[in-house]
Image (cartoon, coloured by chain):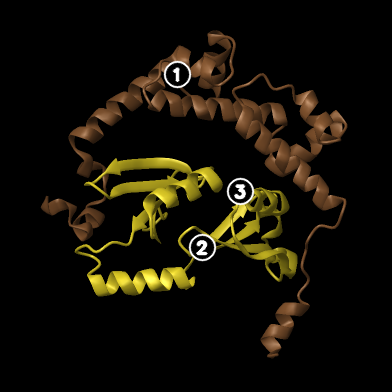
Chain colours: A brown, B yellow
Amino acid sequence: MSNADKNRDDKEIITPEYPRVYLYIRIVQAKLFIDNNYADEIDLENIADEAYFSRFHFIRLFKSAYGKTPHQYLKSVRIEKAQQLLREDKTVAEACFSVGFQSLTTFSGLFKKIVGESPSSYAARHKEMKKKISEKPLAFVPSCYAYQHGWLEK
Amino acid sequence: MITKMTVTNIHVLDQDSAYDFYVNKLGFKLIDDIPMGPDTRWLTVSPPEQPDLQLVLFPVKVSKMFPQETADMLITLIKQGVFGCGVLTCKDIFATYEELKSKGVEFLKPPTKEFYGTEALFKDDSGNYFSLQAINNFSHEDNI
């Protein structure tokens, strides 16, 4: 075995020891649960229960890992998905209800707060952008790339 | 005066697979996905909190840029894991490590303590590798 190999083997491997690794896995599972079920009515109390945490402990650990409370994270995922739906030409109402909001007013207010513009303005801007892209796609690609790829020759 | 890097390349073997890896597994944001012919597209993504840096998921295909021999050579090197594409930072390296592992990302090294912080290494779907580091652990001052 070379010295380099030996040093590598001797290096401290920080694999969190039980129960810490368990905590991480539970927090990650809670985050993935939100990622996969954001459109449903999610009871965050239930997530804490299922992760075997007190609500307070769960929120604290979640925030330390992701920088947001579970509730803030759920809202951000919903708005993110709504942006995606609006870019795919869904209406504001479709986007709102598809991502789990019950009220258009709540949705629009939160959307504007997070994104910085209203859902309808966001949708209109992206529709216009898509139109421009479809008319002149090469205008959106740095010309050095287009040249090297041979796209300018078409 | 140069102020920023705004666009850089990651050479990938398959753009559909790279899209799935970078967007659905790593959680990068899609910036552009513009068709440029029957089987190629201008595909760029950004790290979630860095919208002004676009990574071009650049397909290695025979083209003006890549004659057959060059493309073959590059594909071989990418598959061999020769190319390191940079350091990605996260808030919590253990949570990120567990999440990416649960999504099937292949790690070359679990989080280990290095002189510059705590670091893990993982591969993308093509074979390029990245270092993953925790922001809070990445400080030279800690090591002085």
* Distance CA(mark 3)–CA(mark 1): 31 Å
Type of residue at label 2? Answer: Gly
Q: Secondary structure at mark 2?
A: strand
Q: Which residue is mark 1?
A: A119
Q: Residue B81: give x, y in percent of width and height.
A: 49, 70
Bin the neighbour count of mark 1 within 10 Å (Cα to Cα): few under 14, some 14-19, many 20 and up.
Answer: many
Residue type indicated by callout 3 = Lys
The crowd level at tag 3 (other Cα within 10 Å; few <14, some 14-19, many 20+) is: some
Q: Chain of mark 3?
A: B
Q: Are the residues at dot 3 and dot 1 in contact (C-beta closer than 8 Å)?
A: no
Residue B131 x %, y %: 58, 63
Which of discs 3 and 2 lies nearer the camera? The answer is: 3
Chain of residue at mark 1: A
* Distance from Cα at disc 2 to Cα at disc 1: 35 Å
Q: Are marks 3 and 2 in contact (CB under 8 Å)?
A: no
Q: Amino acid at mark 1?
A: Pro
Query: Which residue in the protein does label 3 denote?
Result: B103
Looking at the rendering, which quadrant does residue A41 occupy?
A: top right
Subunit ID for the residue under disc 2: B
Q: Is residue B53 visible?
A: no
Q: Real-space Cα distance between discs 3 and 2?
A: 21 Å
Residue A51: image x %, image y %? 81, 36
Q: Which residue is mark 2?
A: B86
